[in-house]
Image (cartoon, helix red, strand yellow):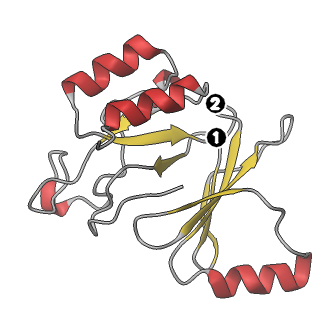
């Protein structure tokens, strides 16, 4: 039995993980947003404004969102909202990770996900009382996803057609 996006979003909520619906990839490979094939973030950006504040683990809201847009990809807000700090390693970032580990020591064991592009999300507990910026390209092929950021999660579909996986 195929897991629907709503089923998956509800599973995150069951674990008290807030979610937000994202635009999705249409059959022709375009984004569901008004930019369509010209979108720079196909399937990776929120459907609604105020998404960080309005992301939720509230079941009834999740049912409303995914009943209205059943193909919506799933986003999880990072930082203080979910208590997640994510190291986003783009495809090809293995060399940068190896260099960082050679200098600073091995990354701690943690939950990881394979992104639709073949990269990785390393999910760490957000360190309360610290301010860690949501920052792109702080090193080659590495981003941090923190407060006011998000990650796309399984079983969402990437523009490549690949599925995000835990």
Residue extending furthest toward the top:
60
Task: Identify which residue is drawn at 64% across, 30% down.
Answer: 81
Choose between 30 and 119: the one closer to the eye.
Answer: 119
Q: Please report contact status of discs 2 and 1: CB closer than 8 Å, yes or no.
A: yes
**Label placed on residue 121:** none
Residue extending furthest toward the left:
28
The answer to whether residue 33 is left or right of residue 40 is left
Secondary structure of the residue carrying tag 1 is loop
Q: Residues within 10 Å of mark 2 (few under 14, many from 20)?
A: many
Choose between 42 and 25: the one closer to the eye.
Answer: 25
Which image quarter holds the N terminus?
top left
Choose between 51 and 107: the one closer to the eye.
Answer: 107
Task: Identify which residue is drawn at 36% across, 52% down.
Answer: 44
Q: Quadrant of residue 61?
A: top left
CA gap between label 2 and label 1 equals: 7 Å
Q: Nearer the viewer, mark 2 or mark 1?
A: 2
Give percent across and percent down for residue 40: 29, 62
Q: Is residue 152 above or below residue 93?
A: above
Give percent across and percent down for residue 37: 14, 61
Q: Quadrant of residue 62?
A: top left
Which image quarter holds the C terminus?
bottom right
Give percent across and percent down for residue 91: 50, 78
**Label placed on residue 81:** 2
Q: Earlier in the sequence, mark 2 or mark 1?
A: 2
Task: Identify which residue is drawn at 75% across, 56% down.
Answer: 110
Residue at the disc numbered 1 = 147
Q: Residues within 10 Å of mark 1 (few under 14, many from 20)?
A: many
Give percent across and percent down for residue 84: 68, 42
């Amino acid at each position: 039995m195929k897991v629907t996006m709503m089923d998956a979003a509800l599973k995150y909520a069951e674990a008290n993980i807030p979610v937000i619906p994202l635009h999705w990839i249409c059959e022709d490979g375009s984004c569901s947003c008004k930019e369509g094939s010209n979108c720079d973030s196909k399937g990776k950006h929120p459907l609604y404004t105020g998404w960080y504040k309005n992301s939720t683990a509230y079941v009834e809201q999740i049912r409303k969102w995914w009943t209205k847009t059943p193909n919506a990809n799933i986003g999880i807000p990072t930082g203080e909202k979910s208590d997640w700090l994510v190291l986003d390693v783009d495809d090809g970032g293995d060399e940068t990770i190896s260099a960082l580990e050679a200098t600073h020591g091995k990354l701690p064991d943690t939950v990881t996900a394979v992104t639709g592009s073949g990269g990785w999300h390393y999910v760490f507990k957000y360190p309360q009382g610290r301010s860690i910026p949501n920052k792109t390209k702080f090193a080659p092929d590495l981003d941090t996803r923190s407060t006011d950021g998000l990650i796309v999660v399984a079983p969402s579909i990437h523009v490549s057609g690949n599925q995000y996986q835990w």
